[in-house]
Amino acid sequence: MGRKYISDAVIRRLPRYYRYLGELLDNHITRISSGELSQRMGLTASQVRQDLNHFGEFGQQGYGYNVELLHREVARILGIDQIHNIIIIGVGHLGQALVNYTNFERRGFYVVALFDIDENIIGQTIGGKIVRPVEELKDFIKENAVDIGVLTIPKKEAVQMANILVESGVKGIWNFASVDLALSDPSVIVEDVHLSDSLMRLSYKLSNQN
Amino acid sequence: MGRKYISDAVIRRLPRYYRYLGELLDNHITRISSGELSQRMGLTASQVRQDLNHFGEFGQQGYGYNVELLHREVARILGIDQIHNIIIIGVGHLGQALVNYTNFERRGFYVVALFDIDENIIGQTIGGKIVRPVEELKDFIKENAVDIGVLTIPKKEAVQMANILVESGVKGIWNFASVDLALSDPSVIVEDVHLSDSLMRLSYKLSNQN
DNA sequence: TAGATTGTTAATCGATTAACAATC
DNA sequence: TAGATTGTTAATCGATTAACAATC
């Protein structure tokens, strides 16, 4: 259960399962077969069953899956049944967008502090939180059980800031800067959101339609 | 050349090639072998050569690849040597972050208009552009050769707005709402940026480290 | 020329799909 | 019981890696 190797392809689909199961719940659908779920998600029934069976046996022959139970199980697999304390480094528009995105809190991600280097911003209150100087970063992380650091700063600063985060003991980095971070400690998880990569992929697909 | 089927895995790597080649250019490195490039990117040399050969023969035996030429070729493959007119629907923090992200312009993506439904925001000037009411959306798209619509609005509005975009004739949608859009016209390309999916993947990896 | 490195074919590996016995 | 649908093994498909002749 959660022990064998899980491929990246499966991991990428997990949040989608969670989302679709949430929608089913909202629509008061209590059970669903792999066939029905796969159809909604654009997968095959086999794939749904294979994916889920990496983590356990959640279904029942002749019945399918209980939506509420499966939704809860996927949440547990994703670790969003736990609380994560996150800090945001860089309170530009992107950083502010993330501060104000209340849906994160519903999934256990609590923004516990904001940091910036800009003296004009430091001290301001944004989304109910004071913006602190990055000099306080290290101590704050150590004293407040911060799991995740979010880098919403330009790539030049991102590299050194990432290393400070690692030294300070964060477990994961959510990286919005347009670089692939090479960290000293490989046990720190980096999840990249490369917006310009995404836009270029869109451009590619526009230029190369069948 | 650009004719055979290109897998999603390859498409996902293309912007990374572009980025790494750009860095090489910045560092005044004029040529690079598949071996050296693969090492920097965390791929195999075979994979680099296979990937590039989907699109043409850009290298030279005994020499490797000319960085400037390859960089330009990848730009062409990605379609970022063309100009794309984009509009942003939803001028919250996320929308504003995108308006102000000047790097997009360097790659030919021009934000030509902003739209919102909020009367308090309509008429304001943001990043030098006036925020227009969504009622003007349809006409604007038709009259201004808009390629790409960016949806930075909540998922509930996103679905109907996506359909308006499609009806108005956009070619692609850059979707930041947390839904998979089911469009009436399948020839319209959708590129999703599901931020909460990304955060959940980070959470998964934190919970399930080896 | 000798050395380096490509483009490409063949081999391998892994992910997806199909099939079906087990069972609710 | 009959029907539905799972969990899982086997078959297939596709992507990655290895190998190497061609050639700069």
Image (spheres, coloured by chain):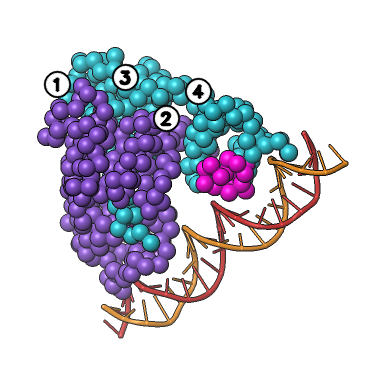
Chain colours: A cyan, B purple, C red, D orange
Q: Are marks 1 and 3 on the same chain?
A: yes
Q: Is residue A8 above or below residue B39?
A: above
Quickly name the residue at label 4: A82
Q: Which circle's residue, 2 or 4, is located before the other in the chain?
A: 4
Q: Which circle's residue, 2 or 1, is located before the other in the chain?
A: 1
Q: Which circle's residue, 1 or 4, is located before the other in the chain?
A: 4
Q: Are marks 4 and 3 on the same chain?
A: yes
Please state if C15 lies on the left or on the right of A136 as rendered.
right
Residue B130 in sight here: yes
Quickly name the residue at label 1: A120
Chain letter of the residue carrying label 4: A
Question: Which residue type carries mark 3?
Answer: Ala
Which of the 4 image quadrants contains residue A119? Answer: top left
Which of the 4 image quadrants contains residue B136? Answer: top left
**Residue at image point 38% right, 17% down:** A144
Question: Which residue type carries mark 1?
Answer: Asn
- Asked whether the residues under the numbered discs 2 and 3 touch, taking CB atoms below 8 Å apart as contact, a structural biologist would say no
Percent across and percent down for residue B155 are: 39, 32
Image quadrant where one finds the N terminus of chain B: bottom left
Chain letter of the residue carrying label 3: A
B105 or B58, nearer to the observer: B105
How many numbered marks does the figure carry?
Answer: 4
Quickly name the residue at label 3: A113
Q: Which circle's residue, 4 or 3, is located before the other in the chain?
A: 4
Q: Which circle's residue, 1 or 3, is located before the other in the chain?
A: 3
10 Å crowding of disc 4: few (<14), some (14-19), many (20+): some
Quickly name the residue at label 2: A171
- Which region is colored magenta? A34-48
Is the magenta region chiefly helix, strand or loop? helix
